[in-house]
Amino acid sequence: MNSPLVATDLVQTYGEGSNATHALAGVSLSVAPGESLAIMGPSGSGKTTLLHCLAGVLAPTSGSVVWKGADLASLSDRRRTALRRTDFGFVFQSGQLLPELPAVENAALPLMLAGTSRTEATRVAAAWLAHLGLAGLEQRRPGELSGGQSQRVAIARALAGSPGVVFADEPTGALDQATGADVLSVLTSATRSTGAALVVVTHDEAVARHCSRMITMRDGRVTGEYVHEEAAR
Ligand code: ADP
Ligand code: MG
């Protein structure tokens, strides 16, 4: 499913009048199939808001996000939710695994929600866990895994559904630097191996080295764009 994700003139305003916050003040960007895009910028610059708009989690105040020829805002809530499950994968900072479920069931859950049988979803999830170095830990619950292992489960969960785009919001924010670097290289290389695009918000300069392109943001605007030739495909 080789389709770009195209955002045009995204504006997101919270509040009104003198209380208004322009979290996004006109952002246009496009994510090509298979590319990895890092989004950097200070806290409050609009990175999470941008990610949520791109992923159809949040409807922008104005502007559009087009995926496979459809404006996400034009879809019904049901269609948009279904599309998020089948086409997009998500990795958050931490704490987004269900604590009562074993790793393999956490990783299998989005596939099952999208209609895949439990047997098949579990098979795919286990294969991803093994691929990401977690063979033998399938039955551990999140509380029995390290921070780095938990993020690998989250990556397996994001990739198990063969998404077109993986969105990651500060996926290494809760990890020490060495573990974070490991997790990031797992995230970029595993995503790349599937042909999915990756959009990753990060504070970490080192992240950009793993990505084919980086944009910087400030006050709801894109302030810079850098193409990393070596990582570009
Ligand atoms: P970042 O991820 O770069 O730290 P965010 O996208 O979370 O930035 O936030 C951008 C701006 O929008 C900030 O000023 C933040 O306080 C504001 N903001 C974010 N979410 C909300 C919300 N739900 N209600 C009001 N203001 C918000
Ligand atoms: Mg944020």
Image (cartoon, helix red, strand yellow):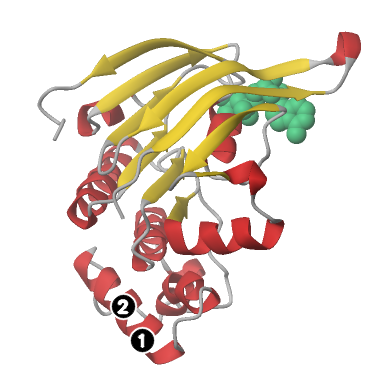
Q: For this view, does 152 lie left or right of residue 58?
A: left
Q: Which residue sits at x=70%, y=57%?
A: 77
Label 1 packing within 10 angstroms: few (<14), some (14-19), many (20+): few
- Residue furthest bottom in the image: 119
- Residue type at the position of mark 2: Val
Q: Foreground residue, 60 or 132?
A: 60
**Quadrant of the image occupied by residue 127:** bottom left
Q: Is ligand 2 within 8 Å of the beta carbon of the residue shown at mark 1?
A: no
Q: Foreground residue, 81 or 178?
A: 81
Question: In the rendered structure, are the residues bearing label 2 and label 1 in contact, judged by CB atoms less than 8 Å apart?
Answer: yes
Residue 144 to residue 64: above or below: below
Label 2 packing within 10 angstroms: few (<14), some (14-19), many (20+): many
Q: Which residue sits at x=16%, y=30%?
A: 232
SS category of the residue bearing label 2: helix
- Which residue is under mark 1? 120
Q: Position of residue 72 (x, y in %)?
A: 59, 45
- Residue furthest right in the image: 17
